[in-house]
């Protein structure tokens, strides 16, 4: 019997990534025999506690942090909320000004907007045409009342890497807290909290082959932060709620696996990304890269296809088994144009025709070949049809 199984290529890893089989294997015992509550004193509780603390060590080691500086959360969104609201509440008497950028994830943007409604002043820095923020923009925005700078490390739509280390230097000089949403950087490029000089850093497990619904916030030792989740004394009083033990163990294993593969991630995944990008830009006319060619994470590529709607192309690719995105997963369901590409001041036509390809360490050369075999003819056909209409 001949069965025709459609080839599936997953290039939407910035939305979420497949769980590494070793991560799942590490998690399963914590759903089964090691089901204890990590806050319990008895043996089952202590087994769970050991799992949580081992995971904390692995996350800390991936970031160059101390274990006491890692607090587990329900993901990147909670870590961003906890960082920004926590600093705002702790430093309100010192000042009311926050600096962020217009290309942040909604987890940061909506939190800042809410703080504005509560009386804080927020400066939103616009990126340049490549999606990059400059150090001098941050310097100019600083004022006596600035209490917090929140700038993402790597952008989720175009992959631009912000000059965090230099921003960290300015923040230290001005005694301003620096938070970074590093959800799209951790596990992909080296992230060392000491070298970057950040006080707070958010990460999320499901972006680097860990489970969904778990993440962490790095809180530099000694930093005052008001908890916004109140209840029991979990996570040393910094985040109440029974720990998601299997999820945390999964995050720890994902961090360990990421540390192992980090060295060749750039060369291997970046090499595949470049081949995909060059293939598209060379073979398909009227295509253009969005975002910087260089200061960019190795796994992300945003390309605009002129004379086409990104959504149409996304659906066409899906029919061929290829999963991509028109932008961020959280906004692609809405018909709003991408706030990142809009902030970069790209033309409406270029924004409408944008597709994001995001790779992972599980992406293969065959995956890229399949896309390059499929896409040119598809684009040509779709363009012909749209001209005829
Ligand atoms: N920050 C960035 C840059 C992201 O890309 C995402 C996820 O899309 C988040 C935060 C939110 O993370 P989570 O899905 O874990 O809440």
Image (cartoon, rainbow, N blue to C red):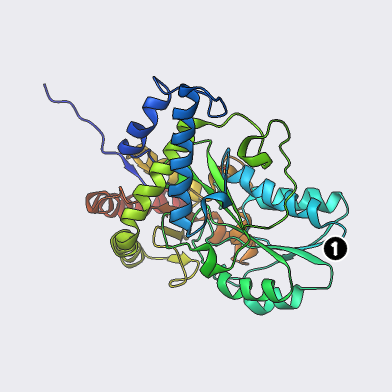
Label 1 neighbour load within 10 Å: few <14, some 14-19, many 20+: some
Where is residue 262 drawn, in percent x and y? 35, 58
Q: Does the residue labelled 1 lie within 8 Å of ligand 1?
A: no
Q: Between residues 281 and 181, which one lies in front from this camera angle?
A: 181
The structure residue drawn at horizontal position 62% and vertical position 46%, both measured from the top left corner, is 79
State left or right for residue 298 relative to residue 275. right
On screen, residue 360 above or below 292: above
- Location of mark 1 (residue): 95
* Count of numbered circles on the image: 1
Where is residue 226 drawn, in percent x and y? 75, 47
State left or right for residue 117 relative to residue 286. right
Q: Between residues 265 and 298, which one lies in front from this camera angle?
A: 265
The quadrant holding residue 320 is: top left
The quadrant holding residue 9 is: top left
On screen, residue 6 above or below 345: above
Query: Is residue 211 at least partly visible in the picture?
Result: no
The structure residue drawn at horizontal position 39% and vertical position 58%, both measured from the top left corner, is 299
Q: In which quarter of the image is the N terminus?
A: top left
The structure residue drawn at horizontal position 34% and vertical position 40%, both measured from the top left corner, is 20
Where is residue 120 drawn, in percent x and y? 84, 57
């Amino acid at each position: 019997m001949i069965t025709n199984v459609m080839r599936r290529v997953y290039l939407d890893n910035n939305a979420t990534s497949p769980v590494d089989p070793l991560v799942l294997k590490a998690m399963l015992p914590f759903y089964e025999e090691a089901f204890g509550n990590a806050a319990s004193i008895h043996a089952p509780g202590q087994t769970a506690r050991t799992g949580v603390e081992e995971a904390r060590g692995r996350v800390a080691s991936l970031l160059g942090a101390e274990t006491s500086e890692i607090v587990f959360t329900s993901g990147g969104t909670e870590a961003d909320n906890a960082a920004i609201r926590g600093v705002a509440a702790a430093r309100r008497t010192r000042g009311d000004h926050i600096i962020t950028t217009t290309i942040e994830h909604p987890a940061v943007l909506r939190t800042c907007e809410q703080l504005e409604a509560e009386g804080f002043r927020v400066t939103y820095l616009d990126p340049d045409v490549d999606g990059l923020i400059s150090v001098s923009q941050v310097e100019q925005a600083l004022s006596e009342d600035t209490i917090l700078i929140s700038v993402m490390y790597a952008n989720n739509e175009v992959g631009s890497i912000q000059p965090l280390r230099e921003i960290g230097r300015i923040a230290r000089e001005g005694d301003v807290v620096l938070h970074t949403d590093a959800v799209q950087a951790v596990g992909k490029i080296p992230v060392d909290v000491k070298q970057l000089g950040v006080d707070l850093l958010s990460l999320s497990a499901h972006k680097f082959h860990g489970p969904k619904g778990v993440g962490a916030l790095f809180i530099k030792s000694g930093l005052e932060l008001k908890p916004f989740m109140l209840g029991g004394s979990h996570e040393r009083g910094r985040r109440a709620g029974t720990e998601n033990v299997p999820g945390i163990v999964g995050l720890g294993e994902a961090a360990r696996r990421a540390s192992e593969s980090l060295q060749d991630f750039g060369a291997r995944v970046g090499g595949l990304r470049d081949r995909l990008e060059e293939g598209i830009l060379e073979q398909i006319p009227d295509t253009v890269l969005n975002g910087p060619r260089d200061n960019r994470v190795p796994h992300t590529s945003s390309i605009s296809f002129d004379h086409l709607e990104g959504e149409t192309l996304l659906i066409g690719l899906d029919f061929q088994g290829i999963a991509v995105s028109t932008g961020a997963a959280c906004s692609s369901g809405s018909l709003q144009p991408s706030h990142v590409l809009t902030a970069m001041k790209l033309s409406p036509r270029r924004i409408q025709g944008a597709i994001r390809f995001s790779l992972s360490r599980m992406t293969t050369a065959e995956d890229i070949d399949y896309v390059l075999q499929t896409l040119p003819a598809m684009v040509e056909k779709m363009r012909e049809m749209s001209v005829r209409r």
